[in-house]
Image (cartoon, helix red, strand yellow):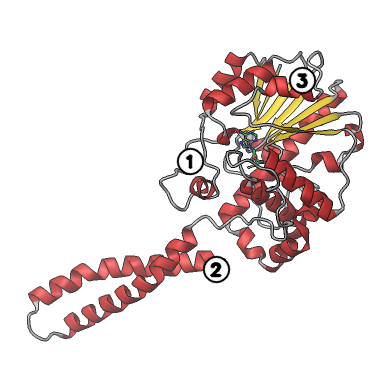
Amino acid sequence: MLFALVRWIGGTFLVASLALFPPALVAELVFRKHHPWKEHLIAAAAVAVAIGAVVAPAAWLGLRFPRLPGIPGLAPGVGKGARRPDEPATSMTAQGVASLRAAHQLIDGPPRILDDPISVQLIGPEMSARIQAHPDHLRYHRVAALRLHVLLRSRYAEDRMAVAVQNGVRQCVIIGAGLDTFAYRQPPWGRDLRIFEVDHRASQDTKRGLLENAGVAIPDNLTYVELDIEKMSLKETLIAAGVDRACPVFFTCLGVLVYLTRDAGRDLFRMVAGFPTGSEIVLTYTGSESAEEDPTSLASHARALGEPWLSRYSAEELAGELREAGFGAIEFLSREEATRMVGTRHDGLEPPKRVRIVSARV
Ligand SMILES: C[S@@+](CC[C@H](N)C(=O)[O-])C[C@H]1O[C@@H](n2cnc3c(N)ncnc32)[C@H](O)[C@@H]1O
């Protein structure tokens, strides 16, 4: 709301000053002597320029993608432990999206798109209080759209996982798990699953610290797999961690592909497609929107956090890559289905304009 107002005021004065300045100049040149219209025009242009000069920078700041918050109160040193200088640091984007899932529990109305009380425990009371004190910030349309995407991708992945489990799948690998909470709020149908969370060591250390702070127990059927997907073989590492290559696996890769190079993405697709029939991956991808050159974009924001976007796909490109890797069925979540998940609501969350969530099955 505040952002929108500042942007509107700044934009109006900027346009007014630009519009008034040329006629004022012409008036000055044409009516060399005193003329009441000339004086009024010049005065109006001067006022508009002066106000525009003050408000326009504020408007520009208002246009920037609002900062996705890191979680305050992280235990000092959490995630910093024995990290080597060449190891990636704790993911800040993972903390940002976790805050968005928590915000859904705290400030959005019914129906819940994703029921995730653990996310609120993870971010802690300080961050929860901040979210509740400034709900407007999170209702800004770009943040609301991102929140909806983050909710829909988890909801869709978990809906698909329930179907896979019904069909006999008993292994689940969460790639780039960040602060994903599925393992800590397992529904009854998930209890027979063996769950593997893959991420960088620092992000996993941070997560364990947050879980401990929040008093959330680590379930027996969960294994942490420390790995840099760009540098190590995902398949070998998973098998070494206990994934059974003879049985189907359900994979999720939510908000991660964009941080991998195209080559690493291709290897990932082939690796998943190499598991037995019944295996599946639910993933998200990023298109050409949100250019890095635009300092207000989410891409620039992620780069500033040290997590640059490395790959983008059109729907056709991604479908081609997945087919080439060997997947049989490829299904893009439709806007209609996403709209059904959003449901009828009165909290301002609107159905998404576009959806970039895919299921690919072996
Ligand atoms: C935007 S977060 C998404 C986290 C989680 N999937 C979610 O939806 O909340 C991206 C995650 O991918 C992880 N990641 C990025 N590149 C990676 C890599 N090369 N190897 C392992 N994990 C990676 C980051 O550490 C981070 O946890």
Q: Residue at x 79, y 18 (%)?
A: 248
Residue neighbourhood size for the residue with mark 1, other residues' Cα within 10 Å, grouped as few (<14), some (14–19), many (≥20): few
Measuring 68% from the left and 39% from the top, which residue is drawn there?
338
Query: What is the spatial separation of the Cα atoms under label 2 and label 3, in whole angstroms?
Result: 51 Å
Real-space Cα distance between discs 2 and 1?
25 Å
Q: How far, Cα to Cα, is label 3 from label 1?
A: 37 Å
In the picture, residue 86 is in which quadrant?
A: top right
Q: Position of residue 10 (x, y in %)?
A: 41, 68
Q: Which residue is mark 2?
A: 2
The picture quadrant for ligand 1 comes to top right
Along the polypeptide, which appears first: circle 2 or circle 3?
Answer: 2
Q: Secondary structure at mark 3?
A: helix
Mark nearer the N terminus (2 vs 1): 2
- At horizontal 34% and vertical 67% (from top left) the residue drawn is 14
Q: Circle 3 sits on which residue?
A: 239
Other-residue count near label 2 (Cα within 10 Å), few / some / many at <14 / 14–19 / ≥20? few
Point out residue 211 in the picture as x, y percentages from the top left corner. 81, 49
The residue carrying pointer 3 sits among few (fewer than 14), some (14 to 19) or many (20 or more) residues within 10 Å by Cα, namely: few
- In percent of width and height, residue 44 lies at 28, 78
- With 85 as the anchor, is 274 left or right in this view? right
